[in-house]
Amino acid sequence: MTSNKAVDSVLYPLSQVPLQAYLTNTLQVADVVEWAMAQMPGKVHLRQTSFSISEEFVRRLWHMQRSGKVSEVELVLDHKATNKTLRLWPFLVQTINRLYLADNHSKLILLESDTAGEVTQVAIITSQNLTRGNRHESAIITTDIGVFRKLEASFLDIRDHHAVPLRELFNIKMQS
């Protein structure tokens, strides 16, 4: 896990700036997720979409889950990334509560706290897959509830109407 120093040098506290953006090669999406969660009360329900995911990102998710800060992780990946997803399958089933495949190229992260507080919903729209890269990546981060709810509705539509749950494909119970 990383310190928030790099993120703090690019972004302001979520409670002070409800809409912000970056374009840099100094941040990783996992760093931004951890930074945002640290500003949220209680446990966080994490919903994500990505074209692809790496072992390193899954490892970071595993640590986030084990920290007790994450209550549930839902993930929608692209069908075309299936070979990579299947290679990570043993690790994914230990880390992700619900994993789906869909025609997806979006990179979206929705964080929602189970506890009332100043920052309870965060939406991150990023160019970076759930991988580690040293490229310039961009993101928009907002705590606007209207934006969050619109993106959440779209996530739920993909999940419920356009995706295939991997647990059903393999008849395996995902970690709860």
Image (tube, helix red, strand yellow):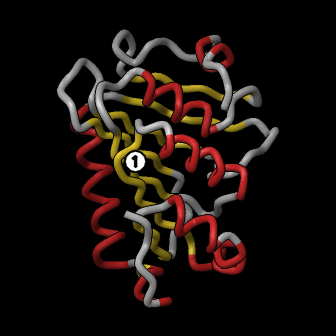
| Residue 153 sits above or below residue 170 on the image | above
Report the quarter where the C terminus lies: bottom left
Q: Nearer the viewer, residue 92 or 118?
A: 92
At a point 70% along the width and 80% down the height, the residue shown is 83
Q: Is 165 positioned to the left or the right of 127 in the image?
A: left
Place residue 2 in its image quadrant: top right
| Residue 151 sits above or below residue 155 on the image | above
Q: Position of residue 141 (x, y in %)?
A: 45, 31
For mark 1, give the secondary structure: strand
Place residue 42 in its image quadrant: top left
Q: Is 145 positioned to the left or the right of 26 in the image?
A: left
Residue farthest right in this picture: 134
Report the quarter where the N terminus lies: top right
Q: Position of residue 107 (x, y in %)?
A: 53, 52
At a point 37% along the width and 78% down the height, the residue shown is 162
Q: Position of residue 23 (x, y in %)?
A: 66, 29
At a point 53% along the width and 31% down the height, the residue shown is 34
Q: Position of residue 4 (x, y in %)?
A: 61, 18
Residue farthest left in this picture: 116
Q: What amino acid type should be assigned to the residue bearing mark 1? A: Leu
| Residue 138 sits above or below residue 118 on the image | below
Q: Nearer the viewer, residue 3 or 67?
A: 67
| Residue 29 sits above or below residue 129 on the image | above
Labels in figure, total: 1
Q: Is 88 positioned to the left or the right of 115 in the image?
A: right
At a point 49% along the width and 37% down the height, the residue shown is 67
Residue at numbered disc 1? 46
